[in-house]
Image (cartoon, rainbow, N blue to C red):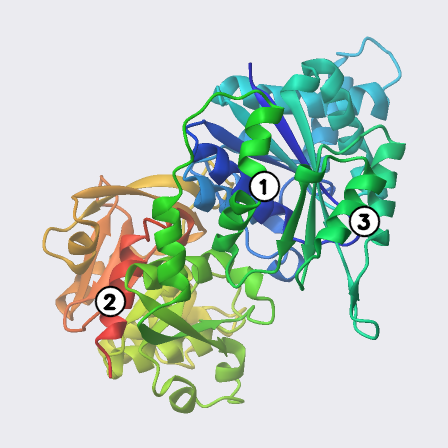
Amino acid sequence: MTRFIFCTGGVVSSLGKGVTAASIGRLLEARGLQVIIQKLDPYLNVDPGTMSPYQHGEVYVLDDGTETDLDLGHYERFTGVNHTVRCNLTTGKIYSSVLARERHGDFLGGTVQVIPHITDEIKRHIKLLGRESEADVVIVEIGGTVGDIESQPFLEAIRQMRKDVGYENSCYIHLTLLPYIKSTGELKTKPTQHSVRELRSIGIQPDVVVCRADYPIADDLLDKISLFCDVPREAVIPLETARSIYQVPLVLEDYGLGDYLMRRLNLQGTAPDLGEWRQMVDRLLCPTKQVRIALVGKYIELHDAYLSVQESLLHACAFHDTRLMLDWIDSEALERGRIDVTEALEGVQGVIVPGGFGPRGIEGKIMAAQYARENKVPYLGLCLGLQVMVIEFARHVLGLIEADSSEFLPDGPYPVIDLMLEQREITDMGGTMRLGSYPCNLVPGSKAQRAYGTGSVNERHRHRYEINNRFRADMEAAGMVWSGVSPDSKLVEIGELRDHPWMVGSQFHPEFKSRPNAPHPLFREFVAEALKQK
């Protein structure tokens, strides 16, 4: 019988429910259980694919092409499990499905209501994930904060789940904040008490309360929360802000949450094995070297827009026993001359240009690619970063394009994109976008092939533009190596410069497949080359 763990949040948002849910998954996997995690998001968008990164952080893409909330990245990085379309559910998806059925006549003319129709649809998706995944435990994170009006159908659905699957097969975990009052030097429990009371008013009694705080939580406060929230003392778990999110599973384990959940849900497993995870965290927190990397992007005001890129760099740095010093460079500021490219990049040991959409900031990224090429600085281009690398090479090495050549396209100041990169109509997934996992064959002896150590790979895509094949031969003759191509050789997947220590760009997003104990090969070798720089 599949068990279900439901994670809710109270007091304020952004407490780290996603990291907490992922960490619980790590604890259960360490005991030999099969786990999968689902995110229930209360917004009306069908998915975050069309949302600005400033609104919702990065869009995380799964193997099956699903565009999801960034918390799915935490789930996959912590558990190592490849998730599916079933793992991200939004209010928009739920209402779209129910309304389509109503239009089809499935409700036989009956009145369609939030209860039972919307809540039944939510429960159907939760149970379906359990059946399809055959997981021992399904962990369900409910987005938003208890008390938000848009979260109420999801909370009502998980309340009903206990009746459906039974007390012994369900567990409610509530993550809450203990705010610190500086004037009195106290952590306060009252907001937590009110948050739990809000939950109980809708029929949900939490089995576990995880208490977030920026300061150590005294035992008497935990006793007080246990008493007033009617939760066993061993199930009131302190979670002080950690130096790294990868410490969170270890903190929860040290406070006994893993063992408690095994008893509470009557799960049978092995002794917990977190040795390799602890070693990774030790390397991450106590490195012997450091490396300075510049990330050149246009959404740098919100670092979550590049969350998977940051985490992939951390994974690679932990592998090399290295501290990451990350410089955030605004590509639009470079483009407009507010920042000098030499001053911004002088002294960095590596340059990363991540993905993005639209022309804003493109010229600044091209300037960064030019600096990396001319100064032999290791460069890693992710999706748009490959396209920028190709444009820069065509412009400044082959002289195919003038920087101000607006005659190619009358309606835009960036004709270089349309000249060098052709937009293909992709009809199988994502409309005009190539979404999800696609195969890539690697050229023997290339930098990319040596990094992967294999002849073919599968990587996740999210982009509209492809390298224009009309220019491939000319660019290859001038020093570009198309080191990764689709099986039919019609699409470029990886490009690299022949006479450069490491200037590699991928059409796909390698950051989506990097894991803490298994850094992505392109990130791993990029950091290795960066460490060779003085």
In this rendering, the answer to whether 128 lies above or below 384 is above
Q: How many marks?
A: 3
Question: Which label sits in the foreground, 3 or 1?
Answer: 3
Inter-mark Cα distance, 2 to 1: 32 Å
* Residue 209, quarter of picture: top right
* In contact (CB < 8 Å): disc 2 and disc 3: no
Tell me which numbered mark, 2 or 1, is placed earlier along the sequence: 1
In this rendering, the answer to whether 403 lies above or below 103 is below
In this rendering, the answer to whether 170 lies above or below 199 is above
Q: Which residue is drawn at 74% across and 46% down?
A: 144
Inter-mark Cα distance, 2 to 3: 46 Å
Q: Residue at x 67, y 15 (%)?
A: 165
Where residue 365 appears, x then y in whole percent? 42, 74
The three-letter code of the residue at mark 3 reads: Thr
Q: Quadrant of the N terminus?
A: top right
Where residue 513 appears, x then y in whole percent? 38, 47
Helix, strand or loop for disc 3: helix
Where residue 302 appears, x then y in whole percent? 60, 67
Q: Quadrant of the C terminus?
A: bottom left
Helix, strand or loop for disc 2: helix
Residue that numbered label 2 is attached to: 528
Q: Residue at x 28, y 48 (%)?
A: 491
Tell me which numbered mark, 2 or 3, is placed earlier along the sequence: 3
**As rendered, which of 119 and 431 lies closer to the eye?**
119
**As rendered, which of 39 and 290 lies closer to the eye?**
290
Residue that numbered label 3 is attached to: 192
* In contact (CB < 8 Å): disc 2 and disc 1: no
Residue that numbered label 1 is attached to: 21
Question: Which label sits in the foreground, 2 or 1?
Answer: 1
Inter-mark Cα distance, 3 to 1: 19 Å
